[in-house]
Image (cartoon, coloured by chain):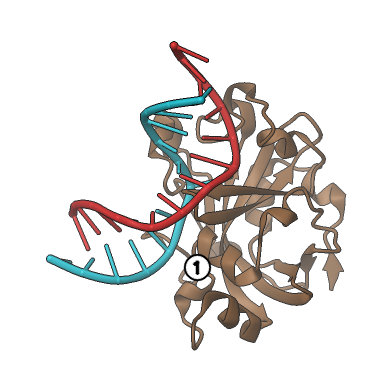
Chain colours: A brown, B cyan, C red
Amino acid sequence: MNVLPVSFFHTQPTLHIAKMLLGKLLISQADGKYTSGRIVETEAYLGIEDKASHAYGNRRTLRTEVMYGQAGQAYIYLCYGLHQLLNVVTQCSDIPHAILIRGLDPVGGIEEMLMRTGKKQVDDSLTRGPGNLSKALGIKQMHNGQSYLGPLLYLVDDYYNVPEKKIGQSPRIGVSYAQEDALLPYRFFIKGNPFVSGKIRK
DNA sequence: CTGACGATTCACT
DNA sequence: GTGAATCGTCAGC
């Protein structure tokens, strides 16, 4: 059981980090409660040269500033005015890479997740998809800029092993606006896991 | 200041 | 398969 060190987030390529995050534990603290899940789906956004990234073309605004900051922070983006999307900032300052967490296998605090989402029992939709998992974990704007080394957010290696042959790769979801970059295979997922979103799950 | 729009989800046809 | 919900952000005026 080991909290990932800050070096994990800047000493290897972002695409590699996105793949390595599969199987890691994500823990959140909100309203004094801890909830956690195992990451089963991620997407990489490679900053200034990636048309799907908010930082494409080196666009630096109040919103994107977090991505230009230190590795290992959370970048949280309000999508469609409804959904908080949870990212991990990677690479050194001024290189605005990020990884979107898109799917979690629930592990701890499931009762709290059910309360937050208003569900009566666990089903695949509890933490499948970036909007759903943020709701279940209680992710809000207050988590923007928080470190994944704690105390509100943690990424933990509990030595859960994801075999290479269980890892799938595909284009990212919902980024058709990014033209040719929409086809880049920057999405990673654990094959067959029910908490992976989208159609391509194996 | 204004308008268009989105890294989504869910209910409904 | 289609459309509504819903609001912060950003480019352009």
Please state if A47 lies on the left or on the right of A193 as rendered. right
At 68% from the left and 82% from the top, the residue drawn is A109
Provide the residue designation for mark 1: A128
Q: Quadrant of the C terminus of chain A?
A: bottom left
Say whether residue A103 is left or right of residue A124. right
Tally the marks.
1
Q: Please rate how many residues cluster around mark 1, counting C-alpha atoms within 10 Å: few if below 14, some from 14 to 19, many from 20.
A: many
Instruction: Please report the residue visible at 59 percent of the width from the left and 22 percent of the height from the top.
Output: A57
> Residue flagged by tag 1: what amino acid is it?
Arg
Image quadrant where one finds the N terminus of chain A: bottom right
Q: Is residue A26 visible?
A: yes
A168 over A163 or under it: above or below:
above
Which secondary structure, mark 1? loop
Q: Position of residue A37 (x, y in %)?
A: 65, 73
In the rendered image of this protein, does residue A114 appear above or below residue C2?
below
Comparing A202 with A180, the one in front is A180
**Nearer to us in this view, A19 or A150:** A150
Quadrant in the picture for residue A150? bottom right
Is residue A112 rendered to the left or right of residue A190?
right
Residue A148: % across, % down: 79, 57
Residue A80 left/right relative to A135: left
Label 1: chain? A
Q: Residue at x 80, y 63 (%)?
A: A152
Q: Is residue A194 visible?
A: no
Q: Residue at x 53, y 44 (%)?
A: A186
Residue A68 percent location from the top left of the image? 75, 33
Tell me: residue A109, above or below residue A45: below
Q: Position of residue A180 (x, y in %)?
A: 41, 30
